């Protein structure tokens, strides 16, 4: 190698120049790197964002699935109402929506140890006497409000031990028209109504259901569906519940003729 390089000074110079210029392309590669990173970066950002969203959703579900269930309280309902109306009502209007002293308006809440029948027996020990004295049509003594027709049917089946000979009516929209329910309520006295807030609200609006004789209104508060949502976690159900409360329920609570329960 050395002997060939010594034959001509020019050859040596060329070889030296090649050795010196050989590293030149390396900086050019480095200069391209920011461009390549810049082009690839948006894809990575989107993928990362998608992964983050997926992880976030999973965490929420996992937390709900693993966390110990906490029974609903009257304060929970009060807080939900305040949060729901805070942006659309004045301070004075918000005060008017407040329920009276909790003990006078609310029944004992379910501590998650009860079946529906045992809970209803606890909050209404004189049910048999009450239902015997109830003869008014287009009304019920007790309303149980839940999130869906399927859940309403489950609740009706689970309260057999409590209801006895009571007349029970399904108050939801699935397969039953409002007019049919109005006619049924006009025909006979009904003791128990189980259904969704939207249909109950519609019956009240059309004059098919009078809330004045109502003594107990129970929310299916703690039950969760397949998505781990409680009834008040579903926006449309929450909206209909609050609209129903304003259609006479709150005023009946304030007069202490109606009690609210959280099952």
Image (cartoon, helix red, strand yellow):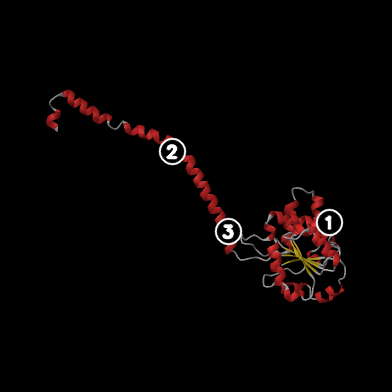
Q: Residue at x 52, y 46 (%)?
A: 49
Res. 61 mark: 3
10 to 64, vertically: above or below: above
| Mark 2 vs 1: CB contact within 8 A | no
Q: Is residue 170 above or below residue 95?
A: below
Disc 2 to disc 1, C-alpha distance: 65 Å
Instruction: Answer with mark 2 or mark 1, whichever residue precedes in sequence.
Output: 2
Label 1, on which residue?
206
Could you say whether the residue bearing mark 2 is in a helix, strand or loop?
Answer: helix
Q: Residue under label 2, please give it.
A: 37
Query: What residue appears at the point 45 percent right and 39 percent down from the top-left corner?
Result: 40
The percent coordinates of residue 93 (x first, y second) are 81, 51
- The residue closer to the viewer here, 194 or 27, is 194
Q: Is residue 31 left or right of residue 168?
A: left
- Whole-percent x and y of residue 248? 84, 58
Position of 156 relative to 84 (above/below): below
Q: Tell me: residue 171, above or below residue 159.
A: above
Quadrant holding the C terminus: bottom right
Q: Say left or right for 39 vs 196.
A: left
Mark 1: which secondary structure?
loop
> Which element carries disc 3, helix, strand or loop?
helix
Residue 136, quarter of picture: bottom right
Are the residues tagged 3 and 2 within 8 Å (C-beta)?
no
The residue depicted at 87 percent of the width and 70 percent of the height is 135
Q: Is residue 154 visible?
A: yes
Q: Nearer the viewer, residue 100 or 244?
A: 244
Q: Is residue 119 left or right of residue 51?
A: right
| Residue 186 pos. (x, y %) | 86, 64
């Amino acid at each position: 190698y050395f002997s060939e390089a010594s034959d001509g000074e020019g050859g040596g110079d060329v070889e030296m120049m090649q050795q010196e210029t050989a590293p030149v392309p390396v900086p050019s590669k480095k200069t391209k790197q920011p461009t390549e990173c810049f082009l690839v970066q948006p894809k990575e950002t989107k993928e990362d964002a998608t992964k983050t969203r997926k992880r976030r959703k999973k965490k929420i579900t996992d937390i709900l699935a693993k966390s110990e269930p906490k029974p609903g309280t009257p304060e929970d309902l009060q807080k939900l109402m305040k949060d729901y109306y805070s942006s659309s009502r004045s301070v004075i209007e918000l005060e008017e929506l407040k329920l009276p002293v909790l003990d006078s308006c609310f029944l004992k809440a379910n501590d998650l140890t009860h079946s529906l029948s045992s809970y209803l027996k606890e909050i209404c020990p004189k049910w048999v006497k009450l239902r015997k004295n109830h003869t008014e049509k287009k009304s019920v003594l007790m309303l149980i409000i839940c999130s869906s027709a399927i859940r309403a049917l489950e609740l009706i089946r689970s309260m057999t031990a409590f209801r006895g000979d009571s007349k029970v009516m399904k108050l939801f929209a699935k397969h039953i028209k409002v007019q049919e329910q109005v006619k049924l309520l006009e025909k006979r006295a009904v003791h128990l109504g189980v259904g969704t807030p939207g249909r109950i609200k519609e019956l009240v609006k059309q004059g098919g259901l009078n809330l004045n004789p109502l003594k107990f209104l129970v929310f299916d508060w703690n039950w969760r569906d397949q998505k781990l949502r409680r009834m008040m976690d579903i926006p449309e159900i929450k909206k209909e519940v609050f609209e129903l409360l304003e259609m006479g329920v709150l005023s009946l609570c304030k007069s202490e003729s109606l009690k609210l329960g959280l099952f």
